[in-house]
């Protein structure tokens, strides 16, 4: 950060070129300079009473009085960081807007700002430029802190602001590094994660919760044996299980519980499985494990790379390097739901294979978006074959040799799916008649390439 960069602001540059503070508005009555006060704290976790910003505003009142100013308006952002991008500070934005228009909501004229320290106002270059442009958009204003009255238009005033910014950035990096090292050291010692207690353990995060731990252990066994994660989540809901924050289990949260390294006693840090520097062996936590490491690795391997269920914050790699399992049904990925939404549009959600409830339809394809459309699996697969190889050969786009290999059983499922993809982009599945026992082949509408 340099003064030349900051001087790109046209207003700041014009004031700098003019040679310093312009003459103050002589129409203002003689006396104390009207200034606005700003306060900010990054956290207010322990007491949650705003005592930090309240104390800063009191200090600002004293500082203003000591330097011939009076506070006409106060702005405070409690528990908001100024060093992270994307954090909205409503009162800082209101302060900047009032500086630009030159008066407060009550009509009080603004001729300066008082603050306990520069880093309360800005810790990022964007905020520094925004604040100084608003402050110096009118002539004769001042900036007041514990060191006294500063001239924001002069080179020295701008350079002091830049130095304060650089110091704040350096301090932020040092604190971040210290915090990272502190978390790493705790993790290497096997200390449990902070925050809400993990599902399956008591409040001490060491001792197993008997009921929850049993649910996790059984769910891992069921998942390894092929049970759908959504079915496991439904079972938990039927049993009345709730998360440690009181929420109902869903597929994603159940997956996060089952694939967390803590279930087998491993410790993770910053999204990676933590390994001892000397032995490269996983760090063991101080808590009681629910399952053995090989069971944890097995359940992680049941989820394919990029699975939405695995999206989470911290944790460890939950994949064992196994290949993504190929679809086990012919029409998987080619069917789209044709049910009508309340707004009149078509759902078009992907339909996935699920276990059926009858011998005639041992599996079905159901919409996972709206849940209002399903079709017999054998019916859909048979209809797809009929669309590829109609009774009139002149309507087919495939060679006769492909038909012979398909119908003779020589073609693998993967090859058959490749043939479908070469002819169709997908098929729309229209909702069927509830209770009908007649297979309606017209329910599938092909969308050809």
Image (cartoon, rainbow, N blue to C red):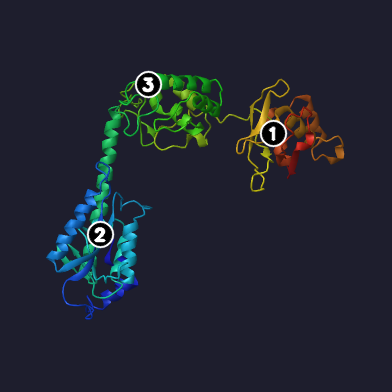
Looking at this rendering, what residue extends furthest in the bottom direction?
Answer: 26
**Mark positioned earlier in the residue sequence (3 or 2):** 2
**Dot 2: element:** strand
Q: Along the line of sight, which residue is nearer the eye, 220 or 125?
A: 220
Q: Residue furthest front?
A: 106
Query: Residue 59, percent across and down?
Result: 17, 57
Residue lying at the far left of the rendered structure: 66
Would you name the residue on which mark 3 appears?
209
Tell me the residue that label 1 is attached to: 417
Relative to 193, is 20 above or below?
below
Q: Few, some or many C-alpha atoms within 10 Å of disc 2 (few <14, some 14-19, many ≥20)? A: many
**Do the numbered discs 2 and 1 sit on residues whose CB atoms are within 8 Å?**
no
Q: Earlier in the sequence, mark 3 or mark 1?
A: 3
Q: Residue at x 29, y 34 (%)?
A: 184
Spatial separation of the CA atoms under disc 3 and disc 2: 48 Å
Q: Label 2: which residue?
A: 38
| Front label number (3 vs 1) | 3
State the image coordinates of residue 444 (x, y, percent, origin top left).
75, 37
Query: Does the rendering let one see residue 370?
Result: yes
Residue 381, position in %: x, y?
Answer: 73, 30
- In the image, 309: left or right of 44? right
């Amino acid at each position: 950060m340099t003064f030349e960069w900051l001087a790109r602001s046209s207003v700041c540059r014009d004031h700098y070129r003019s040679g310093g503070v312009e003459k103050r508005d002589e129409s203002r009555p003689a006396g104390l300079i009207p200034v606005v006060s700003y306060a900010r704290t990054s956290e207010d976790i322990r007491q949650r009473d705003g005592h930090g910003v309240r104390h800063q505003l009191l200090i600002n009142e004293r500082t203003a009085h000591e330097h011939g100013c009076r506070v006409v308006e106060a702005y405070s952002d409690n528990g908001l960081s100024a060093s992270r991008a994307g954090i909205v500070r409503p009162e800082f934005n209101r302060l900047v807007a009032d500086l630009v228009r030159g008066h407060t909501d009550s009509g009080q004229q603004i001729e300066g700002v008082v603050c306990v320290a520069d880093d309360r106002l800005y810790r990022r270059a964007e905020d520094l430029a925004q604040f100084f442009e608003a402050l110096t958009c009118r002539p004769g204003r001042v900036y007041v802190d514990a060191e006294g009255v500063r001239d924001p238009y002069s080179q020295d005033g701008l350079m002091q602001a830049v130095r304060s910014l650089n110091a704040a950035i350096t301090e932020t990096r040092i604190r971040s590094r210290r915090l990272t090292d502190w978390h790493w050291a705790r993790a290497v010692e096997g200390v449990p994660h902070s925050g809400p207690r993990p599902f399956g353990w008591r409040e001490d995060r060491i001792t197993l919760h008997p009921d929850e731990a049993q649910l996790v252990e059984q769910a891992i066994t069921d998942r390894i044996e092929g049970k759908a994660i959504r079915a496991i989540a439904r079972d938990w809901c039927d049993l009345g299980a709730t998360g440690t924050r009181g929420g109902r289990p869903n597929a994603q949260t159940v997956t996060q519980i089952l694939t967390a390294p803590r279930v087998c006693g491993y410790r993770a840090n910053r999204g990676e499985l933590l390994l001892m520097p000397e032995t490269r062996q996983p760090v063991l936590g101080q808590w009681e494990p629910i399952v053995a490491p090989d069971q944890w690795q097995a359940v992680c391997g049941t989820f394919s790379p990029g699975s939405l269920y695995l999206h989470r914050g911290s944790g460890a790699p939950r994949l064992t390097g196994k290949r993504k399992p190929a679809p086990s049904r012919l029409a998987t990925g080619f069917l789209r739901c044709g049910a009508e939404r309340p707004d009149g549009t078509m759902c078009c959600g992907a339909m996935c294979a699920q276990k059926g409830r009858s011998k005639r339809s041992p599996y079905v394809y159901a919409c996972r978006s709206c849940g209002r459309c399903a079709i017999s699996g054998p019916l859909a697969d048979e209809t797809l074959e009929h669309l590829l190889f109609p009774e009139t050969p002149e309507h087919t786009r495939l060679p006769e040799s492909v038909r012979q290999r398909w119908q003779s059983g020589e073609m693998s499922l993967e090859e058959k799916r490749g043939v479908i993809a070469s002819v169709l982009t997908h098929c729309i599945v229209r909702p069927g008649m509830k209770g009908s026992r007649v297979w309606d082949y017209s329910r599938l509408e092909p969308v050809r390439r």
